[in-house]
Amino acid sequence: MSKLYVIYGGQCEVIEIGLELTIGRSYANRLRLEGPDISRAHAIIYLRGEEYILRDLDSKNGVLVGDQRLIKHTLQPGDRITIGGYLLIFDPPESLDISQFTRKAADGDRKLRETDTNIHKRHQRYPLQAIRLSFHDDLDSGEFPIVRASSALRFAHALLTRLSDVNDTGKVCKEALDWSVETFAAHRGLIALCEREGDKPRAVAMFDVDMHREIKIHQKLLDWLFEGGEALLSVESDEGAKPASLEGMDYAHRIAMPLVVENQTRGFIYLENDPPAAPFTVDDLQRLYCISLVVSRKLEAAKAE
């Protein structure tokens, strides 16, 4: 498997690229870089056939390969990539002396970090329309988004196959939840079907998978999911505390997707993990959106019967 050497501040980290490696300042990226010259979503390296492609994601300060600023580049062993103050070396030869790029880091130097649990979290809302547009853009544009889009479609197809002979509402929810927890390696999860009671949503049925402790859905989170039926993703942030609208909730990694039946939000799929497990990402929202479409269609069919 191809590797990327990441050098900064006298430190060298080795990252396995896998199918794709997102790079940027946001904690949603697999490789998180810090600094004012780094965009939140700066670049991506993805596998196409047997080659790795580097692509600039319309970043503010660009990506240099050697001394040339490039938008898209087929990586070759030994290629040196500069992003902000970071030097990235793709599959360096064994003869390369990494020590020539490293030095003892001075006190106060920034360090590369992929995981840091001593931080605040903030919660981002994602209108379903934006998720739909992003997903269909993935299908229609460029090569690199196809990796994510095809993955999401495989998730949805596998779940649809699993539910092909299941029509009972309870069984649909239970099977879909088991699939979601397994797929995302979540610690806990639930599918809630809800109705309005005055101005407040009220859960009328819950199907949960709890690996460690009881799941407690805060009323503020329930309200949030029903205000316009938006998806939710908690992301790690060093920008301060979470919004006042969600004060009082703990800091578990959260992801949630509404279930829309006949253009009305009738419930949601909710998953959470405890730190230091990796947080959910925007790509996970895409996959969960596909799962929610399958469940919503099955619920519509069950209601029609």
Image (cartoon, grey):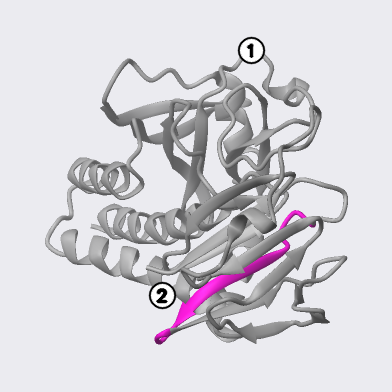
Whether residue 127 is visible to the viewer of this picture, yes or no, is no
Q: Amino acid at mark 1?
A: Gly
Residue mark closest to the camera, 1 vs 2: 2
* Residue 194 in the image: above or below residue 82: above
| Whether residue 162 is situated above or below residue 272 in the rendered picture | below
**Gap between marks 1 and 2 measured at Cα:** 38 Å
Query: Hey, which residue is sitting farthest top in the picture?
Result: 248
The mark that comes first in sequence, 1 or 2, is: 2
Q: Nearer the viewer, residue 177 or 187?
A: 187
**Could you say which is closer to the camera, residue 6 or residue 168?**
6
Q: Label 1's element?
A: loop
Determine which residue is flagged by label 2.
Answer: 150
Q: Position of residue 186 (x, y in %)?
A: 35, 37
Residue nearer the viewer, 141 or 7 = 7
In the rendered image, which quarter is residue 108 located in? top right
Residue 30 in percent (x, y) is at 55, 52
Q: Which residues are magenta?
A: 39-50
Quarter of the figure that contains the N terminus: bottom left
Instruction: Please give the name of the residue rendered at 50% of the width and 46% of the height, measured from the top-left corner.
Output: 258
Secondary structure of the residue carrying numbered label 2: helix
Q: Which residue is mark 1?
A: 248
Instruction: Identify the residue at the far left of this view.
Output: 165
Give coordinates of residue 79: x percent, y percent: 62, 77
Q: Which numbered circle lies on residue 4?
A: none
Q: Amino acid at mark 2?
A: Ser
**Disc 1, disc 2: CB below 8 Å?**
no
| Residue drawn at (50%, 55%) of the image | 15
Q: Is residue 207 above or below residue 285?
A: above
Residue 160 versus residue 246 in the image, above or below: below
Badge 1 density bin: few <14, some 14–19, many ≥20, Cα 10 Å? few
Q: Is residue 24 magenta?
A: no
